């Protein structure tokens, strides 16, 4: 017959209390643009509310918005552009009054770290020289935010008609980054924060802000989101959480230049 000492019984009680606490923990689902991953993962590590489980799904904003529209269980949506946030808001998937612009970003031209050049002047001649017969990776130009910004910039600078046949459209900004990091594309157009997160690439040019729409990341609660989601949004607005984003080259929206 098993005999339990007071110590054994105390351990069992503590264990049961822990299991009970875990079972009562609320799960919050965040759907976030893939370019937020490095900073958001770091911010999540320091989230002080241990009674809430945070699960983050990363993908292109277009993919996430469509999943929410189809009924995916999301509490918070963090988009890389206004268009896909507006898409959900117009269809009543966003909680009224909860949307705000979180951070801003910049658009850059990258090359593999092994490339023989370190800078590319933003002229058609220099861009084509750096590209050669290679490929220029960015997001899908009609749907993925970084690709849409890239197309706007290339059109504004007068390069689009000459460069478009070299474009490889990826499903997200991070996929674009991987193409270049692995040497599968000679050049890429990504966010500055993405370039900083990948040591196998280097920034060779910065696109002027005037060449494309303002890059801002709106954040909002999804309809029927759990009350605990508000806590996480308030944490994101704190100086502690925001510091992880500035370290990753995100900026205050009003400071994008």
Image (spheres, rainbow, N blue to C red):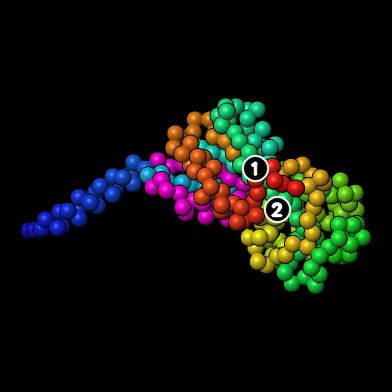
**Figure check: 250 above or below 111:** above
Residue 191: image tag: 2
At numbered mark 1, what does the secondary structure look like: helix, strand or loop?
A: strand
Q: Nearer the viewer, residue 139 or 6?
A: 6
**Figure check: 180 above or below 21:** below
Q: Position of residue 7 (x, y in %)?
A: 14, 58
Magenta stretch: residue 77 in it?
no
Q: Is residue 61 visible?
A: no
Query: Is 246 positioned to the left or the right of 157 in the image?
Result: left
Residues drawn in magenta: 26-50
Query: Is 237 positioned to the left or the right of 82 in the image?
Result: left
Point out the residue furthest to the right here: 125
Q: Position of residue 242 (x, y in %)?
A: 56, 48
Q: Nearer the viewer, residue 86 or 254?
A: 254
| Disc nearer the start of the sequence (1/2) | 2
- Name which residue lies at 72% across and 65% down: 202
At numbered mark 2, what does the secondary structure look like: helix, strand or loop?
A: strand
Task: Assign the N terminus to one quadrant of the image.
Answer: bottom left
Q: Which residue is mark 1?
A: 217
Q: CA distance from mark 1 to mark 2?
A: 12 Å
Q: Is residue 243 visible?
A: yes
């Amino acid at each position: 017959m098993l005999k339990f000492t007071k110590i054994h019984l105390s351990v069992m009680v503590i264990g049961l209390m822990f299991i009970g606490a875990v079972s009562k923990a609320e799960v919050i689902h965040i759907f976030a643009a893939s370019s937020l991953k490095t900073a958001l993962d770091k911010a999540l590590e320091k989230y002080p509310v241990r009674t809430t489980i945070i699960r983050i799904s990363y993908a292109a904003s277009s993919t996430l918005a469509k999943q929410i529209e189809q009924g995916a269980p999301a509490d918070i949506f963090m988009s890389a552009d206004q268009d896909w946030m507006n898409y959900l808001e117009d269809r009543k998937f966003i909680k009224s009054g909860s949307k705000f612009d979180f951070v801003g970003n910049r658009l850059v031209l990258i090359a593999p770290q092994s490339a023989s050049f370190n800078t590319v002047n933003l002229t058609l001649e220099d861009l084509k020289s750096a590209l050669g017969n290679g490929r220029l990776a960015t997001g899908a130009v009609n749907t993925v935010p970084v690709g849409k910004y890239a197309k706007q910039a290339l059109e504004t600078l007068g390069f689009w008609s000459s460069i478009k046949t070299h474009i490889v459209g990826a499903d997200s900004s991070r996929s674009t980054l991987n193409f270049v990091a692995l040497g599968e594309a000679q050049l890429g157009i990504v966010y500055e924060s993405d370039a900083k997160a990948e040591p196998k690439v280097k920034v060779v040019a910065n696109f002027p802000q005037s060449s494309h729409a303002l890059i801002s990341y709106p954040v909002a609660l999804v309809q029927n989101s759990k009350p605990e989601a508000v806590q996480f949004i308030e944490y994101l607005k704190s100086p502690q959480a925001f510091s992880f984003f500035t370290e990753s080259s995100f900026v205050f929206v009003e400071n994008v230049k």
